[in-house]
Amino acid sequence: MPGYPPLALQAGVEGSVTFELSVEGGRVRQISRAAGNPLLLEPSKRVARSWQFGDATNADVPVELRFTIGRSGQAGTARSALEYLPSGGVRVDVLGYRPPPVVLHERPRAGGRSGAGAGGRPPSTLAVRKSAPAACAPSLVGQAELPLYPAVAWGLGISGTVVVAVTVDGGGKASARIKSSSNQWLTAPTLANASTWRFQSGMPGSFDVTYTYRIRGTPTALPANPKVILALPCAVTVIARPVKPTRFNDPAGHSR
């Protein structure tokens, strides 16, 4: 049974999709006459390709999937109900509930150490806020590299904010430029990260993305995993702990 497509659930997209399955020997050979929102349609087609019918089934089967977001219920869950219609078609109703924020932790490698990220730092702990304000932007992020705390700014203890202006074309390609920056050491790494973003096609738009960098917490001897909070596509927050200065001893025993 199909679940609620995650991107559609994140964006609050509801509605129906329809298509026709060409079934031969109980297996789906082709999908045609497809219609509906791409965020709902493409995942539905992928699920339908795995469906199996009776071995003797050789027919064109019309399919309708209806997606609804519930207003109350267990967040992050979905319920599906399938009905065979007298006409020979199939109707599926999917009820989903928006998920809460989730936290993804880097899986340690053998020996208990996590992999190193850019600049020799360990990868970040990622906290993802699944939903962003609807008025923020019409475009949906399809993929993006994980932002890290700019190395030089981190070492110097610099916090600040950078605003990036993003324009997305109909094919999902984005162009980015710096609109404002509170510190030069934050500017280039932020623009480099924003340039890795790719968006869902067919949803062009222009909007601002605010990157906020904060250093807070107890100092640590080694760089600890930053925390990254994504409220895509309009807000990115990176929080890192301060790093203690390193002291060295010369051969004479003097610290410096």
Image (cartoon, grey):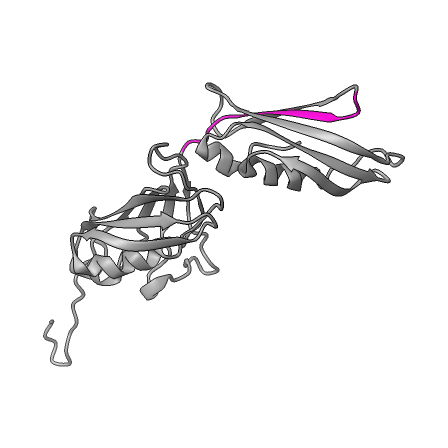
Q: Position of residue 45 (x, y in %)?
A: 65, 39
Can residue 236 be seen? no
Q: Is residue 27 above or below residue 66?
A: below
Residue drawn at x 22%, y 63% as measured from the top left = 152
Q: Position of residue 202 (x, y in %)?
A: 49, 43
Q: Nearer the viewer, residue 20 or 9?
A: 20
> In the orientation shown, which residue stands out farthest toward the bottom?
251
The answer to whether residue 90 is magenta is: yes
Q: Position of residue 92 (x, y in %)?
A: 66, 26
Q: Which residues are magenta?
A: 87-100
User: Where does the N terminus fall, quadrant-wise?
Assistant: top right
Relative side of 51 to 134, left or right:
right
The answer to whether residue 6 is magenta is: no
Q: Nearer the viewer, residue 77 or 3?
A: 3
Residue drawn at x 32%, y 47% as measured from the top left = 227
Can residue 79 be seen? yes
Relative side of 127 to 7, left or right:
left
Relative side of 121 to 29, left or right:
left
Q: Nearer the viewer, residue 217 or 21?
A: 21
User: Where does the C terminus fall, quadrant-wise?
Assistant: bottom left
Residue drawn at x 45%, y 42% as measured from the top left = 203
Q: Position of residue 230 (x, y in %)?
A: 35, 43
